[in-house]
Amino acid sequence: MLMPFGRNLYYADGPTVSFFGFPYPTRMAVARLSTGEAWVWSPIALTKELADAVQAIGPVGFIVSPNKLHHLALGEWQDRWPNAKLYAPPGLAPKKKELHFEAELGDEPDAAWKADIDQTVFRGSLAMQEVVFFHRASRTAIFGDLVQRFPRATTTGWKGALMRLDGLVGPRGSTPREWRLSFLSRRGARAARRKVLEWRPERLLIAHGECAAGGAADIVAASLSWI
């Protein structure tokens, strides 16, 4: 269930979910921190097999969501690991009042994972802000929805045509058009993009589409050139 993605970083693919009628594959990541604890990003539907695999990495200390859309499995993960601290991206806490969040994620990483993971927030959208992370040991940039890149073979029919028009198909990838248009102010997003590129990431791990084991900086620069 969990697959390695560089040193001390793992991912797992989850079920496909429907988003406005479009099928979206899901993916999560787990990092083993230098403290020995597990840091969980964008958790997918929890199964016993997945829970056992995550527990084998280390006790779950932190659970984070990249944006306010990635919340479907947060409750079951918090129930399974009640001592883990849950962190919300901007806009999620008011939406999910039944969950207990430790804090809202910002541009600076929490002290608990600062040695292992950096982060930045893409601001300026009326619709949604996203927190992007950088796992230092594996040189991996971790994106939720801002970078999507789907293989051509899996995007057929009229839905595939719309995704191609949005630039979401192919090795470059992009951000959905309606989300791009919602960034009325791009100053904050440009600063975040600049910070991501300054990380000089080598690998790219994304929630929707194909990850990349190399060339991450070039992919990010191209896919977010609209900013």
Image: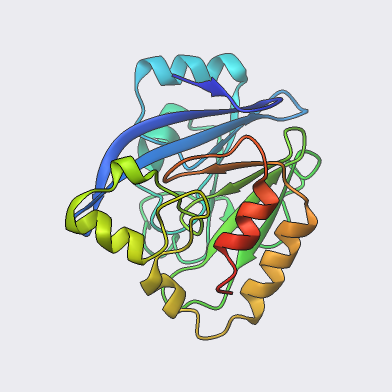
Instruction: Judge by depth and name the residue closer to the eye, 158 or 207.
Output: 158
Residue at x-position 65% and y-position 61%: 221
The quadrant holding residue 128 is: bottom left
The quadrant holding residue 112 is: top right
User: Is 43 drawn above or below residue 106 in the view shown?
Assistant: above
Instruction: Judge by depth and name the residue closer to the eye, 86 or 182.
Output: 182
Which residue, as the protein is rendered here, is positioned at the far bottom? 184
Q: Position of residue 36 (x, y in %)?
A: 72, 23
User: Is 31 drawn above or below residue 195 in the view shown?
Assistant: above
Q: In the figure, is residue 41 to the left or right of 188?
A: left
Quadrant position of the C terminus in the picture: bottom right
Q: Position of residue 215 (x, y in %)?
A: 67, 44
Residue at x-position 53% and y-position 61%: 130
Residue at x-position 34% and y-position 66%: 165
Residue at x-position 71% and y-position 58%: 196
Q: In the figure, is residue 205 to the left or right of 201?
A: left
Q: How many tags in the picture?
A: 0
Res. 172 in view = yes
User: Is 94 drawn above or below residue 29 in the view shown?
Assistant: below
Q: Position of residue 181 (x, y in %)?
A: 43, 79
Res. 104 in view = no
Quadrant position of the N terminus in the picture: top left
The quadrant holding residue 14 is: top left
Q: Position of residue 57 (x, y in %)?
A: 61, 18
User: Is 99 drawn above or below residue 140 in the view shown?
Assistant: below
